[in-house]
Image (cartoon, rainbow, N blue to C red):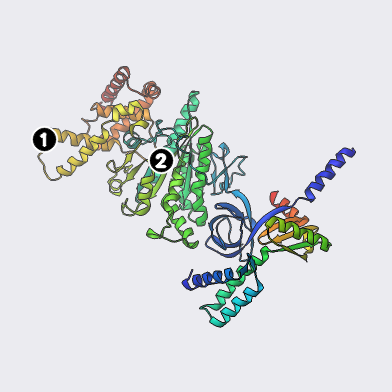
Amino acid sequence: MAKHAKIAQQFARQLFKLSLADGAVSADRVAGVLAFVEKHRPPNPVMVLRVYQRLVATELAKSQAVVEHSGAVDDAMLATIAAAMSRRYGRTVTAAARPNAALLAGLRVHVGDDIYESSVAGQLAALASSV
Amino acid sequence: MSTVLEQIEQQIASLSSKVVKKNTGNIRTVADGVAKIDGLSDVMYNEMVQFPGGAIGIALNLEEDEVGCVILGDIAQLKEGDEVTTTGKLLSVPVGKALLGRTVDALGNPVDGKGPIDTKEFYPVEKIAPGIVARKSVSQPLFTGIMAIDSMIPIGRGQRELIIGDRGTGKTTITIDTIINQAKINKVGLASGDKNFRPVYSIYVAVGQKNSNIVRTLSALEAAGALEFTVIVAAPAADNPANQYIAPYSGAAIGEWFMENGMDALIVYDDLSKHAVAYRQISLILKRPSGREAYPGDVFYLHSRLLERAARLEGKGSLTALPIIETLAGDVSAYIPTNVISITDGQIFLETDLFNQGIRPAVSVGLSVSRVGSAAQIKATKQVGGKLKGELAQFRELAAFAQFGSDLDAKTKAQLDRGGRIVELFKQPAFAPQPIELQVSVLFAMQKGFFDPIELRKVVDAATSLKGFFTTRKDALLTEIRTKAALDKDLEDKLLAACEEWKSSYSA
């Protein structure tokens, strides 16, 4: 890895750490960080911001359960999923629905890089790989 | 009827409500058999990960926000953004007797076109070597069938003996000879019906070799009838470095199965120089810090953890390792050679000069050593070959001095003559290992001076004649030497009489 890329990554990580308040990404702090970068223009600002964006997105994804579904999902179910995920991960996790007809039936929940597969399409894929 | 339907209904309910948790990531970059992956926060070191299209990878670099994986299999279909999933398993290969006679790749998949391998058992590729308590000292011989080695640098079951030398000095030939000899001994032993007989199964691991060389080895083993006791693990030069890196560990896993199940196995790593080069390539792509000769800092551990898996276990079997290292211009003090020399229990050094002089196998007696020593020799070999190494060392020293002077005293001349004859006797054609009882007989004849009156250039012919005489006419005597494994007065007298008989017929 080129030296400047390494420096940019390290700087982006420092900015990311400054963006956390009580272990979660704070909108105010992110705004502060962006203002700082705008004002002081670190070397290689595009790369710094790209890495920073990836780190923030990864962290935000840990606090949001994306519920892919085929069929109806009501608010009560989303609330139940959000509560279950919050208990499991020990932090507040919100739930957002995303329809996906390719699942055929059932649910698939994404939290960060974890996937909870309970769809017919997932079971068929598992069956296909085991045969 | 209704109960049955209820059971089916319950089964459907349990299946449909089953939630499977997967930990995933996405490929950020993929190049030269190595992928950098975002995510995979739950992945463990050395864990197998699943790529799309059936390719699998091993997580080798766990970094703060990415994971570095080596990819085993076809990488042509992979692209940036593809989803990767953890499996929670360590890489395992199929093991068992069903692999004998087969050629497999680094993952244990057959590549010989003989159909699928019928085995249910799997062994992890990476495994911690047996500890001190589980081990037993090396005391049972493993005959290579090469007289120079069996008489002076004996190898025992469970030993790690390095074979080192420049390119084209006969390193692979020695290991093939050894595998063929195990097959020959196995056939005799199994045919004898001896319940205490322990066959030795062989594993030949080809790392970074040309496919043509692997085929040649395969053909040699097949022609000698040794393939039925051998497993070949092939990671040729055309394979990606990840496969070449993993192949010796796969071979070790296959060998460990024999050892753990009370059997004896022999494993040949051909060769670890190319293995180190493959690992260097992977490490550099993974951006690991490089050290001497651009090898990563853990290149010693790469080989030590592999070779430590060779052992003789208390109450179980053994795994003997014959790693091969290729030197450049005979330089044994290079980085990888010194590493492996220090790990193994001795080395057989092959010299280019000896090879070019026609002394084959080109074993350099001075630089070769077996740290197990005579503990791995039968008594008969010790009786006839105990002084050989000293005699040859004296011969080399005197031969160097004799070049400068023509007037030599009778004793010196006799020592030179004897040394010259020993060197001639140790010449042996490739793929023709000699049984230990035949080696003992030839060495006995040499010690008793039966080759002394023979002209030096005719010693090889005389030895061939003597071997033929013993094989065709003294089979009972050879069997007696093999079973007794020691020369008592009676056996010595019989050997002497047989040698006299040969001498009269040879002279005539």
Q: CA distance from mark 1 to mark 2?
A: 43 Å
- Residue under pointer 2: B160
Q: Position of residue B325 (x, y in %)?
A: 39, 49
Q: Is residue B236 above or below residue B119?
A: below
The first of marks 1 and 2 along the sequence is 2
Say whether residue B438 is left or right of residue A68: left
Q: How many marks?
A: 2
Q: Residue at x 38, y 59 (%)?
A: B293
Q: Amino acid at mark 2?
A: Arg
In terms of depth relative to the viewer, which is nearer, B175 or B64? B64
Q: Nearer the viewer, residue A95 or A86?
A: A86
Name the residue rendered at 81%, 60% in the picture: A77
Q: Position of residue B354 (x, y in %)?
A: 28, 46
Quadrant assignment, res B76: bottom right
Residue B25 in picture, x, y percent from top left: 63, 61
- The C terminus of chain B, quarter of image: top left
Q: Which mark is residue B409?
A: 1
Residue type marked 1 = Asp
Res B421 seen here:
no
Callout 2: few (<14), some (14-19), or many (20+) C-alpha neighbours within 10 Å? many
The part of the image, by quadrant, that contains residue B488 is: top left
Q: Residues within 10 Å of mark 1 (few under 14, many from 20)?
A: few
| Front position among marks 1 and 2 | 2
Q: Chain of mark 2?
A: B
- Horizontally, residue A23 falls left or right of residue B61, namely right
Q: Is the residue at mark 1 from the same chain as the one at mark 2?
A: yes
Classify residue B27 as left or right of residue B470: right
Residue B66 visible from this viewpoint: yes
Instruction: Please tell me which residue lies in front, B423 or B65.
Output: B65
Residue plotted at (65% across, 75% down): A28
> Which structural element holds mark 2?
loop
Question: What residue do we see at 62% from left, 44% from top?
Answer: B116
